[in-house]
Image (spheres, rainbow, N blue to C red):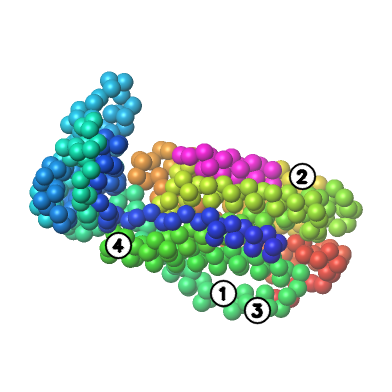
Amino acid sequence: MGGLRLLAVALTCCWWPQGSQGKTLRGSFSSTAAQDAQGQRIGHFEFHGDHALLCVRINNIAVAVGKEAKLYLFQAQEWLKLQESSHGYSCSEKLSKAQLTMTMNQTEHNLTVSQIPSPQTWHVFYADKYTCQDDKENSQVEDIPFEMVLLNPDAEGNPFDHFSAGESGLHEFFFLLVLVYFVIACIYAQSLWQAIKKGGPMHMILKVLTTALLLQAGSALANYIHFSSYSRDGIGVPFMGSLAEFFDIASQIQMLYLLLSLCMGWTIVRMKKSQSRPLQWDSTPASTGIAVFIVMTQSILLLWEQFEDTSHHSYHSHHNLAGILLIILRICLALSLGCGLYQIITVERSTLKREFYITFAKGCVLWFLCHPVLACISVIFSDYQRDKVITIGVILCQSVSMVILYRLFLSHSLYWEVSSLSSVTLPLTISSGHKSRPHF
């Protein structure tokens, strides 16, 4: 298992995409880029409220005036209609349909976006007098460096909030999540460490499960640090955002391999060995090979999705092919593991063992199905709410799944009694020859 995890982490480190910029944008207005694309795309932002603000600062006013530089703001739905329209609008006709226009003839410009009944995504484009011309020689003029700040109104109605409508609330959520992790660590860290330190047949299981939990806590902390900085400057700490996604992917890999190894091991043991040893986890070549293949498949899909969507969210709305394949993979895993556990449960005569498997099945199904189910449920919400619903929902559901597994493996009642029913071996043992009882 250790070699697989190291390989997956190495792949993640080598292929990790760079974080995207925040909503304080810096760059250059380019006449060449604007002419090539019939308008240079600067960025997009989900404005809300009555006093949202777009602030632009430029240094070279003379060049901006000479080029008749302007910014054009389109509502996302209107821009999509223009792109899909069969009328074949010309360059100048498209620009004329912008909902808001800003002429840049000063060092600093402030544009208020008001009277927004509901949060909407706005696209910002740059264009000048060369944009709709066919002669590219005239467009070879000096670029204009700029800094753009996109702001929403805060609770008091002042335009000081760097978060878009789709990001609002995430900062507070990650703060509460980190606080909960801290409180839980203060209460349970010592007893959990003692259980791991004593070893026993549950040693490796607890180590893997705890490592996954620590990675999730690290992801929450990195996200909180990123969003805390983002709330002040609109840029944040892109490295921390990427680190949060790295920790989350590593946690997903850990849990996937753990759950697959347990379920595959139990199924193969039932097919090959006597019913007197139904609870053993044997690390056979078949179970290891299947687990490795599925883990590597999910790792590749996760990395592919990160390249497609570079926003600092561990969970996305799955509008691209990689995201859809991830949804299908998780559904297939939940169904296959659920069917395997169901077959074990139906032939199990012991009530305690059957309860053990049922509880474990609940944890597995919740872990794998929460993402696909929430992705489907998010469709009923507005566009700007979908990412938040998926992000917060998946984190909470997978946290509950981990709690279920911890209670199952550390229980002094259910697990202790179930394990004592087998004089040959314990459930979830790494070594098939280990016959001792757990000591917590």
Q: Quarter of the image containing the N terminus?
A: bottom right
Q: Is residue 280 magenta?
A: no
**What residue appears at the point 70 percent right and 53 percent down from the top-left corner?**
292
Helix, strand or loop for disc 2: helix
Residue at coordinates 59% horizontally, 49% vertically from top-left? 300
Q: Which dot marks residue 343?
A: 2
Give the side of residue 372 with respect to residue 270, left or right. left
Q: Is residue 328 magenta?
A: yes
Mark 3 or mark 2: which comes first in sequence? 3
In the picture, the disc for residue 188 is 1
How many C-alpha atoms fall within 10 Å of the one at disc 2: few (<14), some, or many (≥20)?
few
Instruction: For label 4, count other residues whose C-alpha is less than 10 Å away and answer few (under 14), some (14-19) or many (20+).
Output: some
- Going by the numbered disc 3, the residue's amino acid type is Gln
Q: Which one is earlier in the sequence, the residue at label 3 or at label 4? A: 3
Q: Is mark 3 on a helix, strand or loop?
A: helix
Residue with the mark numbered 3: 194
Farthest residue toward the top? 87
In the rendered image, the vertical position of residue 285 relative to residue 415, given as above or below: above
Nearer to us in this view, 359 or 312 = 312
Among the two numbered marks 1 and 3 on one chain, the one whose residue lies closer to the N terminus: 1
Q: Which element is circle 4 on?
A: helix
Q: What residue type is labelled 2?
A: Gln
User: Dot 3: few (<14), some (14–19), or many (≥20) neighbours within 10 Å?
Assistant: few
At label 1, the amino acid type is Tyr
